[in-house]
Amino acid sequence: MTTMESLIGLVNRIQRACTVLGDHGGADGTLPTLWEALPSVAVVGGQSSGKSSVLESIVGRDFLPRGSGIVTRRPLVLQLHKTEEGRPEYAEFLHLPNRRFTDFSLVRKEIQDETDRLTGKTKQISPVPIHLSIYSPFVVNLTLIDLPGLTKVAVEGQPDSIVHDIENMVQSYVEKPNCIILAISPANQDIATSDAIKLAREVDPTGERTFGVLTKLDLMDKGTNALDVLEGRAYRLQHPWVGIVNRSQADINKNIDMIVARRKEKEYFATSPEYSHLSSKMGSEYLAKLLSRHLESVIRARIPSITSLINKTIDELESEMDHLGRPIAVDAGAQLHTILELCRAFDKIFKEHLDGGRPGGDRIYGVFDHQLPAALKKLPFDRHLSLQNVRKVVSEADGYQPHLIAPEQGYRRLIESALNYFRGPAEASVDAVHFVLKELVRKSIGETQELKRFPSLQAELAAASHEALERFREDSRKTVLRLVDMEASYLTVDFFRKLPQEVEKTGSPAAPTIDRYTDGHLRRIASNVSSYISMVSQTLKNSIPKAAVYCQVREAKRSLLNHFYTQVGKKEGKQLSQLLDEDPALMERRLQCAKRLELYKNARDEIDAVSWAR
């Protein structure tokens, strides 16, 4: 095999591999990434211009659907692979990867059936391509894209938009700078009205990418010829025009062999008075070789940019593989080690959130600096120490005897009942810290890249963390409530001893008269209790955060996963495997990434080897 055949064959193999891996044209007909960087040949022409006949002549096989009107209703990406002499010819469809077609009439039927599968048995079109590979000793290595024929009007059964739909679909292929345009025009029509040439001129005004093909030369009116076109006088292109003689309808009806048809085509040009001087540069065989030579030169010119794209893509794929992680070992010890490493990675991020390396931990400070003081300020002490309630509590505390000097029991009852109000903010602070810690667990699991592969382990870690946080919350709740209860169980005596004694205007201590229940006296009681409550409030405002941090935050940093470590150490190999059961979508993504990486590396090595061969 020559260097040219090797290089074009390599491109075909790469394009085939790209197609198999999904790195190919999508539903909109575009060909992205490496597919787009590799040159291919798009066959463009009006309906009934002879496109199918040209393709069949190049392949040497009768395999395309035929009929009147629009026959090609989906793009056909046709890859020709030259095989060694004596090898059997066969075809393969991408959508039927395990089936080889040796009967090319069945290839025609499958193209028709696969077209109908998307479009129905109508005259609708679809931009989703059909991918067909033909392996034969009688072809040259080429990738040809057969596109629906351009039309000027919609016929019955077609939407009014079909004219523009077909043109847009064809244009999406031919406008790409690496696309070689094979513009098919019938010789028995004025070249000025050629749909193919019109479209090619729009996307390739200099004609550098366009090859003009003139079909149906044998059907021209007697006394006329196409020399003005073929010799470049009527419409000049950068590349020479090629004339083709298609099989007649009678030949098709008689199933004339394509090899025989090629021989008859050669005889036509060799014996034609008008075209004999051009016979060496006419015909389907010459066209195939011309395209192959041009394709080889384009590939050589594109090798630096193709190699650059491949290297860039390899770097991106290797980075993605690192991000996705390598496959997990089956050994239980290795799996346990992996789980512990993943836990440490999560724990490290969780601690960074608490210590300030990552955002979120500051919300705990916000609980103590804003939420707790605000909650303490909202406690209903004004209502509790209202004149009416103080009178009620003091009177009830005296029983059947009025107090003598100071309403001690009244004071105690007012203070103790007031201190109960602190239980709410204390528990709310614990709950608020708990909520922040749970949220930080969730964020930390999401930010641990290594864990993204293992949804089961994520769920187990989240459950174990929440269970631990619940224990810490309960301990913290008991602690802060004890702080409140401690304040209620023993009042600070010195505070009340320092209160000024009430004296009458005479200067002697007040006597136990009804005046003890005056509004002024009750207001002083309320004021004294309020002062004491304020002192306790300040104390709790400082001690509740200490308790919450000690019981919740400190323990979360120290022992969030301790219980989980104990439990996971007892698990058997099968249970460990279940924890490391990856997301199927991610496993598939890694598999596809690995295949693409292998494809691109092989492509780089082969391009390097072939491009430097002499």
Image: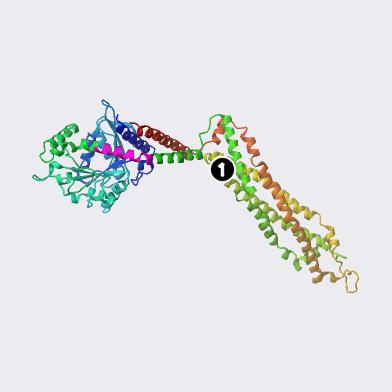
Residue 374: image location, x then y, percent? 67, 60
Q: Is residue 525 visible?
A: yes
**Res 72 → quadrant:** top left
Of all residues, the one furthest to the front in this rendering is: 614
Q: Name the spot of residue 614 as percent of width and height, x first.
A: 33, 31
The secondary structure making up most of the magenta span is: helix
Colouring of the image:
rainbow
- Residue 154 belongs to the span the image colors magenta: no
Which region is colored magenta?
290-306
The structure residue drawn at horizontal position 64% and vertical position 48%, both measured from the top left corner, is: 354
139 relative position to 448: left or right? left
Q: What residue would you read off at disc 1?
A: 448
Q: Quadrant of the N terminus?
A: top left
Lateral position of residue 563 relative to residue 193, left or right: right
Residue 63 appears in the picture as rendered: no
Provide residue 585's location: percent of width, then percent of height: 47, 40
**Mark 1: few/some/many CA within 10 Å (<14, 14-19, 20+):** some
Q: Nearer the viewer, residue 247 or 603?
A: 603
* Label 1 residue SS: loop
